Structure formats: C-alpha cells, structure tokens
Amino acid sequence: MRIERLHIHGFGRIKEQEIQFNSPLTVLAGPNEAGKSTILMFVRAMLYGIPSRAFPAERYEPSGGGSHGGMLVAEAADGSKWTITRYAAPERRTGSGRSEQPTIVKTNPQGTAIHMTQHDLEKELLGGMSRDMFNQLFAVTLTELQEIRTLQSGDMGSYLFHAGFGGGTEIVRAERKLVQNMEKLYKPRGRVQESAKVLQRMEQLQREISESRSYLSKYIHAESKLSETQQTIADVDIRRTDLSRQLAVLHKAQEIRQQWLEWKEASIERGGISGEVSFPEEGLSRLERLREERNRIDIRLEELERALEEWKKQLAKLQTDELLISQGPVIERLAARREMMEIRIRELQELSGEEAALKEQLQRLLRQIHPGWGQLELRSFSGAVSERESVRRYAAGFAGYDRRMEGFALEREQKNRQLESAEYELERAEAAVSERKEAGKIRFHMIIPQTRTELLTAWQELQSEAERWRESRLSRVSAMNYEEQEALVSGRMRALYRKLLWGSAVLTLAFPAILWIMKSPWGALAAFLVFIIADVLLWRGSEALPGNSTSRSGRRKNGSLYSPETGEERISHLMSSLVSDPLTASASSDGPFTRSSSISDQDMESSLRELRKLVDARLLWHEELEQLSADADGVRQQAELFKRERLALIRKMDGEQHTFEQLDSQWRCWLVERGLEEGSSPETVMDMFGFAEQGMELVRRLDVLGRKWQALKQEIDAFEKECLTILPEHEVLDLHLLSHLGMRMRSWEEQQHLLHKREVIGSKLEPVQEEMFRLEREKSRLERVMQSLLDEAQAADEEEFLRIGAVSERRKELERMIRQLEVNMFSGWSGDREQALLNVLNHYDQAALDEACIRAEEEMSSAEKRWNELQQQRGRLLQERDHLVRLCSHDTALQQLEEERAHLKEIASEYAVLSICAEMIARTRGIYEQEKQPQVLKLASTYFHELTRGSYSRIVMKMGEKRLLAEHRDGSLIDSSLLSRGTAEQLYLAMRFALAGSMNSQVSVPLILDDLFVNFDEDRMCSALDVAGRMAENKQIILLTCHRYMTDHVQRRLPQAEIIRI
Amino acid sequence: MVPFKFIHTADLHLDSQFKGISGVSDDIRSFLRESTFASLDRLMQLAVSEQVDFIVISGDVYDAQDSSLQAQLRFHEALDRFGEHGIGVYIIHGNHDPLDSPRMKTGKREHVHVFGPEFEQVTLLRRKDQKPAAVIGGISYPTAKVTENTSLRFRRSREESLFHIALLHANVDGDPAHETYSPCTRQDLIHSGYDYWALGHIHKRQILNELPYIVYPGNIQGRSIRETGAKGCYVVQVNEDGKADLMFHELDTVRWFQEEIPIDSMEGEEAFQVQVEDRMQQIRSECQGKMSIVRFVITGRGSLHEKLEEGRIAEELLHELHRKAVRSAAEPSGFEGLVWVESFHVRSGPWIDRNALLLEDSFLGELLRYGQHAREDEKSRSEVFRKALYPLMANRELSRLLNEAADEERNEWLQRAEEMAILLLSSHEEGGGGKIDED
C-alpha cells in the first residue's frame, strides 16, 4: 500500500491540514512541535482507530475542541484506492461501545466503490498486521525502537518466524484458543471448571464409599461378635442353672432349718421312749368322755330334782272356786246373749221414738184435710175411683166454661180495637179532604173559571193567541241584527285612516326638511306639497266613515213598525179572563210575572210560561180532591161492619154465664154430701185425696210398730229374769243387771285360767319324773363301761390309766410330727438332692447357712445381670447387622463414583487432546524458529553491517534465551544491552528493516520512522539513509525529522525524495 | 464313567461397577447395579432347568476392593438356593476375592466346597444316584497377587479313571489385557492330565484347547466397553466316554456394544443422526428384552468432523438420547430394549488429505511429521505427554486416571490432537486482521 494523502481535520494541535505524498520516499521536516509525531499518530489512528479516552496521550484530542479526526487515502498494491475517514465521537458515550464510526471505502481500479469494515481493512490493506506490530515495526518512534522487549514478545516472534504460513496469526490464535478451551476444562487449583466440580463430587462420594466399604467389615465383625455372644450366653445359661439349683438347696435349707431342728429333736425324744404299752385305742378320750357323761348325768339329775320341787310348790299355790265352776256354762250362755240383748233394748227405744214421730205426722195430715177430722174420719173416707172421677168431671166443666169465656172476651177486645181504628181512619180521610179543598181555594183563588172544562177552553184560546204573537216577534229580531254588524266595521276603518294620517303628517314635515338641508329647496317644497295633498286625502277618508253609520241607524228605526201592540193586548185580555188578579198571581208563583205593560217581549213570554204552570197545577188539584173523597166513603162503611159484629159477640157470652151457674150449684151439693168444706174447689178435693192416702199409710205403719214393740218387750223381760238367777242375791240392786253379768263372766274366766295353769304344771311334772328314772339307769351303765376300760388298760384306777394314756399319746405325737416334718422338708426333693440338703443342714449352722445363701444369691444376680447384658448385646448386634443389610441394599455410591470418574476421564481426555495439540504446535514452532530464524537474521546482519559501516559483521539470536547479540568485526559477541546507544539503535533498526523486508511478501506496508537517526553519527546516518532509499524502491517510506542537516543530507543523497516542510 | 452335567462359570464380579458411563438416572443406576445379581439369578435358574449335577465357579465372585456387603449377602443367598435344589457348588477364589480379603463367615454348607490356598481334590458324587462321577481339583488365591505358576500343582493320579476337572484362576499364555497372575502356558495345562480346565480371570469367552478342554467362560455380565457382546456360562455335558459337550448360555442383563460410524461420505447432521438411530434400532432388535449400552466410534474423514469438533453436535445428540433413555427407563418395563449410548468417540478427521499435508513444507506439515515421529519414537512421545499432561498430574485423582490410560488411548489422543491442529490451522480463509485492542 501507499499512503497518498492525509487530510487532518483536527488531531492534536493540527487543524485542517492536508498532506500529499507523491514520492515513495517522503521527508516531513519541521521544528519541534510542528506536529510530526502528531502526523505519525494520525496515521496510526486512521488505520487502526482513534485510541479511547483511556489513553489520552495517544488519543491526541484537538486542543481547542472541534472535530477530532480526518481522512486518509491510500492506494493498495492491486491499484484500488482506500479512503478511510474517522472521527472520534464528540462526547463520551456510555458503555464500552466504540467511540468512533469509521467510513472505509474501497474503490476498485474499475471505479466501483465498496464499503468495507475495519476487519477487511486490516486484512486486505495491511496484510493482517496487528496494531501492535504496526506500531512496533512500521510506524516507529525512537522510544519504541529502544524497547528491546518489543522484539521479544511472543506475538512478534511467532509473527516474524512463521511468516511463511498464513502470516502467523493463525498459530497464535490457535494457541490462544487451545489455552482458552483447556482452561475451561481444567486449571490447577481452579474452582469453576467442570473438572473441579466433578472432583469435588468425587471426593464427596469417596467419603461416602469409605463409609459403605466399612459395611462388610462391620457386618463380619457383628457376625463374629454375635456368635461369640451367643456362646457366652450359653455358658452363662449353664452357670445360671447351676447356681439357681444350688441357691434352691440353700434356700430350702434355710427355710426348713427350723423344722429340721424340730425333727431332729423329735427323733431323739422318740428314741427315748421304750417299749410297747397296750393301751386301748382312744383310751384317754374315751375315759374322758365317760367321765364327762357321768358328770353330765349327775348334774342333770340334780337339776331335775330341783325343778320337781319347784313345780310342786307352785301347784299347791293354785286354789279353785267350786260354785263358779258349777255356774260356769250358764254364765257363758248369758254372756253370749248379752250383746244381742243390748241391741234389742236399743231397738225398743228406737221403735218408741219412731211411733211418736209417726203419730205427729198423722196429726198434721189430719189437720190439713179438715180441722175436725180424726183417725176415725180418715178411716171412713174412701178414696174410691168413682169419687175421684166425679170430682174430675166437675173440674172439667169449670175449666171448659173458663176457656170459652176467655175466648169470647179476647174476640170482643179485638172487635173493639178494629172499630176504633176504623173510626180513626174515617176521621182522618175526612180531615184530608177538607184540608185539600181549603188549600186549593187559597192557592187558586185568582183563577176565575171554577170548573175544569171552563179552564181548559180558556187556556187553549190563550195559547193559540200566544203562537201568533211569537211569529211576528221573530221577523222583527232578524232586522235588528243586521244593523248592529255594520256599525262595527265602520269603527275599524276609521281607526286605520287615523293612523295613516298621522304617519303622512310626520313625513310631510320631516322629508321636506331633509331636502331643505340637502340644499334643494325646490325639491323640498315640491315634496311638501305632495305630502300635504296626501294628508288631506287621508283626512277626508277618515271623516267619511262616521257619516255612513249614522244614516243607517236611522233606517232601522223606520223598518220595525209592525202591530205587536194588538196581539199583546189580546193576550192580556185573555189572561184576565183566565186569572182574576194577575199581579197577585205572579207574586204567588215562583218566576217574576209582571204584566207591567205590553212593552217587553220577554215579560210576555215569561208570563205565558207561568200561566201554563198555574193551569197545570189547578188541573192536578182537581183530580186529587176527587180521589180523597172516594177513600173517605170506603172507611166509613168498614166502621159500620165492625159495630155489628161486636153486638153478636156480647149475646153469646151471656148464654155461657147461665150454664156455669147450674154447674156450680151441683158441685156445692156434692161437697156437702161428703162433709167437706163448702168452699173447696174440685182441685182442693183432689189434693185431699192425696193427703187421705198418706194418712192411711201412716196409720198402717203405726199398727206394725205397735206389734213389733210388743214382741221385743217380751224377749227382754225373759232375759232379765234368767240373769237374776245367777246373780248373788246381795248384789242385785247395786248395779245394772248387764254389768253384773259382765263381772260374773270375768270371774268365771279367771277361774278357767287357773284351772288351765294347774293342768299345765301337772303335765310338766310327769316327764321330769320319767327322765330322772332314765338318768339313773344310764348312770349305772356308765359305771360299768368305765370299769371295763380300766380293766383293759390294766390300770388300777383312773389316775394310772391317765398316766399310761399320756405316755402312749406322746409317742404317737412324736411319730406323727417326725413324719409331717419329713414330708414338709423333703417333699418334691429326690434322693440325692435330699441327701445334699441334709448335708448342708448338717454342716452349716444358721449363720453359715445365711452367709452361704447371700453369697449364692449375689452370684446368681450377677449371673442374671450378665445374661441380660448379653441378651441386650445380642439384640444390638442383630439390629446392627440388619441395619447394615438395609443400608447396603440402597448403596449406589460406588457406581456414582464410577460415573463421575467416567465423566472426569472424558474431561481429562478432552483436555489431553487440547493440551497435546497445543504442545505439538509449540514444538513445531520451536522447530520453525530454529530453521527460519537465520534468514531474517542474515538479512538483519547485512543491514547492520551496512549501518555500522562494517564495524559489526553479524546479529546473532540465542535460541531459548531470546537474546540478541552483535558480532563485532573482530569476532567478539556483544549483548545488545551492552552496546552503545547508537549502535543498539542501529541494531534494532537493522532488525526492523530485515523483518519488514522479509515479511512483505503479500502487501507492503509503509514505514514511518520518527526521527530515528538522531543518535547516529553522520556517516552512519548517511548509511541509514542509503538503506532507506534502497528500501523505498518497493515500499513507501516516510521519514520525520526536525533536523536541518538531515534534510540536507536527504536532498543530497536521495534526489528522488520529496521533502515537505511543515 | 457315569455321564453328568455341570455348569462352568467364572468372574461373576457381583456388585461391581459399570465403567465409563455417566449421566444416568437413579432408575438406570439401580438397574445397572442390580444387573450382576440378575445374571446370578439367571445362572441359578439355568442350573435348575438344566438339572445340572453341580456348578464350578472359577474365581472372582466379587470385587474384594469394593467390600460390597450386598455382593456377599446375595452370593450367600444364591448358594443357599443352589442347596435347596441339591446342586453342588465348587468355588475357588481369584485375584479379586482372595482368601485374605474380608469375607463373610457362614455356616458350613454341605453342598458348597471352597478350595483352600493349597491344591486339593474332591471326588464328586452324581446327584441322582450318588455314584462317584468326577474328581475336581482346585486352588484358591491366598492373596491378591499370585505370581507362581500354580497350574503345575495339578497332577492327576494315574489309577483314577473318573473325569477330572481343574479349577484355576489364571492368565494362560499371558494375555496382556489382563494382569498376569498365576502365569502358565497351554502346554502346562495339557500335560497335567486333567480332562477339563475350568478357568477364570480372562473376561473374554474362549476355548483355548479341546482335548483336554481349556475354557474361559468369560464373565456373566459385561461392565465396560472392553466387555462387549453376549456374556454367560458353559453348560458341560460329559457322556459315558468321558467326552465333554459344551453349550454356551447367555446370562447377561445388560449388553455392551461398540459401533463404528464412518463419516466419510456423510453430508449433514441429519444423516449422522439417522445413522446413529439406525444402529440403535439394530441393537434393540438384536437384544430384545435386554438393556444395551453402546459406544459409537466416529471414524473416517469428512466435512462433518468439523461440526463434530466445533459444533458439538455429538454432545447434543448424546444429551438428547440420554434424556430419551431416562424417560423411557422411568416407564414400566422400560429397561427392555433400552439402549444407552455410552459416548461418541470422535476419531474422525477433517476433509483434508493428510498424506499430502505430511509431505508439505508448511507448519502443519511440520507438525504432522512431528506427530508421526512421536508415535514411533517412545521417548519424544512420552516427552510430549509429560509436558501436555503436566497440569493434570497435579491432581491425584486425575493423575491416577491418566496413568491408567492405555497406550491405545494415548495414541488416540495424539491422533485427535493432530486432527485438531489440522482443523485449527488449515482454515486460512477464516484468519484475518486482529481486533482492535483499544483497552
């Protein structure tokens, strides 16, 4: 490429400057601060972008503000033109976004312009050179030249040395990428890499596994422990049984020791009793029993004797009354009847009471019937049915008479009432007729015709006359209406004319006045005249109207001259014929009927109307009057009829009275016959019948009572007589007979009781004597038995018998005791155990035994405890074993570990591949460096040789150390850092020239050297210029300098160079 | 001689882990864990249904280093059940379950005979009539590492006419894939005079010799990609003439497969996916009712390689397949026909003529030449590996893992590294100007 033109709009201090490069070698000369370095930086910025604000030193912002940037035009090797325009964004934008927007346009030789990107620019125009490399190799300032490390950076190295293969960047990128990928996979001590996570998981799993690995050993351990425990349990079990047996023996011994002692003692005592004694079985008890029996009998005998005595004494005490005993049955019988007798006496008293009552009642009844009546009359009064019947007949006769008389009296009463009402009616009807007549006379007194017919004819006449009068009146009224309408119209017209006249009058004055002002007096005058005329006309018009109306009204008056007067007169005449005093008539009637004159039509009409009403009323009154008189006649006839009927009734009643008197006389005879009171009515007689019957009843009952009383009296007397026989004479008068009887009865009962007691005692005595006899016999039998018993035991007496008996008893007891103790002690204990027990008992005393027992118990409990512990242990072990089995069945940690391992292996192999790849690239690069380096160095050596004018022959690079050495002419090697400043710079320049030359196979990038030769001596500078001139043949070179001698030299040595002064 | 029937099995490796798989769900993990036991159950069922007289187990019943209690419990349970059916069991211990390893002590079982660390012989009575049928000699590993040739201790007594069976856990003729314990040669065994060498230790089923029979039945359940194919035991019928007739029976619960997928002519991802799913379907139909684990090895050179390396399509597909498998495993009887993809092993390369590159005088050419050199030259290769794996070695776990890696695997890494380098360095077009490093 070749830079053709720079257009700096604003960069550092430079503003709006354009620089054209026409020659391959250009020298930009200017004093300090002229902007040479700024131009260098501008080129860098144009090609690679304006540095960000983070690098203000390289950014070169315009000092006075304004646009920051410019344009660069370059020509590529293929002839296309690149125009690069860049401007830094005026203000900082947020974020890391680029602060500039370049415009890169590539124009083909054919002329087509294409927009390109920065990437394209770097790739095509700059041959893929990086910014750093451009800065370090092609656009070099003095400072950069002196930086030795710039040559030794990895990038640079690979770029330089591998120029043959795609420019070397790919290798760098590949290496970088590999390293990136590797770091993603694994990094020693890294934490975020996948491998680290896997490793962490593995560690976790391994921990788990070390746990699960122990399951087997734990299980085995548990298993062995278990069997061991089981063995121990068996051992302990045996020991436990032994101990428990031993303990049982000891306990037993302890328990029976007391018994054993007794047993031992009894055995010894038993041994002491010698020989056999014949002693009757149960001898002692038998003797005892016999003795007891004997004693008992003795006691009993004594008791009985005492009792016998007692009884006898008592018997002697009880004495009896013989008389009483003989009377006994009689008393008893009487006593038995006594109750009854008492009742009889009471009955007798009641009967006499009842009789008195009955007699009194009878007396009353008799008084009721007739004061003179006694029992005799009563008995003679027969209440026969026939008598009753005749009384009833009389009674019916009287009753029939009463009934009939009553009926007639009622009827008569009714007739009287009817008659009265009929008379009253008649009176009223007559009164009404006369009243009506009177009213009619007052009301219609003014009407002249008295009869109906007269009135009617007069009325009809009047009506026909009134008709005629009406017709004539109608025609008159229509004519009057017409006149009234005309008068109305003319009134309106006149009002209109008046208004117009006012309007025109105003105009007449105003209009000419206006015209006058308008300076046309003639016109005004003319107009005035015209208006005046109009006014006059109007005035006339308005005046004409009232004149018309007056003329017409006059005509109407004339046309109404018809003959109403005659008609009216006729009517009034007729009226007067009809009504005597019209004024009074009209006043008495409702409406105003003023027959003032013949003048008013309305009056005429109304009078006619009133008259019609009056006539109608008069006709109605006539009819009513007739009706009323007819009614009065009817009522009068009825009254007459009632009077006749009453008279007939009175005659009937007199007949009845006569028959009654006959019946009454017959009744009086009947009463006298019977001896009854004369005044008695048949009803009283009927009542007397009832009383007589009751009296008869009472008499009958009195008879019965009298008979009863008699019988009772007899019975009581007989009883009393009998009672007297049993009573002792001297007591008779003292008390009532019956209480005496009671006393006798009681003493008899006492006697009876006494007798009974004697009997009882006698019956008791007998068995006592009998028993005494029996006991005596028993006693003698016992004596015999006892003797035989003594004989049997060969005992002289009872005492001896007892002694022998006691000995024998003791022996038996001892034997029994021994047996019982043996059973108690050894029951359920087999022979050898019994022996062991006996041994223990024989060898231990109480204390020793207790001690042994406690010891054995302690041992036992410890064995028991041990056994329990072992059982628990066994349980624990079993549980642990089961737990382990359960755990292991769900344990997949090993498999998981294996999975993680597989994963890790994958990562590792991935890493291995990448790493091996990187390693191989590195190694190949090493080979490359060794093989390719000499070519660059060779070229650099020639340049160095030339620059130092033969002082140094060669540049040598030590591999591995990456150090540059200079070989002096004399063959000595000098490290670049030890060279003089100028020489070192020449060395680096030579290297740059060589590198730039060796890598320009594809594109030639311009070299811009910013005052690099300042430290060179004149000769060496000239040499450098020569080299530059040679290089300019195939590469654009721009030299920047501030030294005049330098431009001078250029002018002299390089005539083709273009010098631009700034 | 009386005819009889027995089962020869070895290397049960009960409750041992499945290696190389990751990302499984709990369901699948439990199933895998149960698989060795399921195979053991199947072995028992087979013994019952075949009415064998006895069964011999030639070592490695379980992995002692895992100290799995479950394994021991389940094995003892199984022994009890053999006993219930009257089937005798003859066991030797191998390098994984030597006699000195922690073992559960159990009561004496009449039908079980465990050989001790010294050679011993037992005469076996036939089950149905208690006639002597065979002589079984065996020797257990007293410790894990037995380097002595114990086969030499097997000597047949000349006068005994019964069928002789030898139980030995050994690496015959030094198979390099397995630890060389009890090293012996085929000749040693043939000369011993035994009629049937019931061997254990090598997990690959093989019959080394027919007269006498020298047999490795292999293990009963494959547990890593190194143990692909059907796994099971031999049912041996010995007839009156003393002739043995071997019949293999599958016992495995989960089967391993390794499938190669060449990408040479493959164009897009879809084709790759279809290919993978076709293979899976094939496997599914091949072992129905079983779970299978497959490793896909991607080989060949093609444009797909770049996508596999860069676009990680294999990884995504793997995740997808795993997800599917986990889902279907959660369903009832979801393990029947379940295919679990262990991994995709990328051994393919980009579509570049490697041989041409090897001759080219370029950076890549140089690199490949160096790789070639390293593969041949042990020293420079180990140097490369040492340098490359140095950071990993700092970690104990990783260093162990890497040390375990076989040469084959290392070569694979090298190969892949080369392919990666080609991929990274050959894409000229992609390269270009660097970015603006302003900050």
Image (spheres, coloured by chain):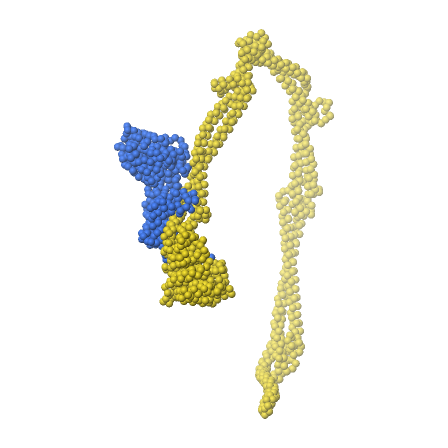
Chain colours: A yellow, B blue
Residue at the image point whose x is 48% and y is 32% from the top: A873
The quarter holding residue A501 reads: bottom right
Residue at x-position 63% and y-position 81%: A600
Q: Residue furthest front?
A: A970
Q: Position of residue A14 (x, y in %)?
A: 48, 65
Q: Quadrant of the N terminus of chain A?
A: bottom left
Q: A449 and B271: which one is in front?
A: B271
Which residue: 46% across, 27% down? A234
Q: In the drawing, does residue A712 fall left or right of residue A1051?
A: right
User: Toward the viewer: A676 or A556?
Assistant: A556
Residue A921: x and y in percent read: 38, 51
Q: Residue furthest left?
A: B241
Q: From this viewpoint, is residue A909 visible?
A: no
- Where residue A80 appears, as percent x and y from the top left, is 38, 65
What residue is rendered at 67% in x and 49% in y? A665
Residue A84 x %, y %: 42, 64
Q: Quadrant of residue A338?
A: top right
Q: Compared to B410, does A1053 lie above or below?
A: below
**Near-viewer residue (B88 or A427):** B88
Q: Give above or below for A676 relative to A86.
A: above
Residue with the most extreme bottom position: A522
- The foreground one among A38 and B438 is A38
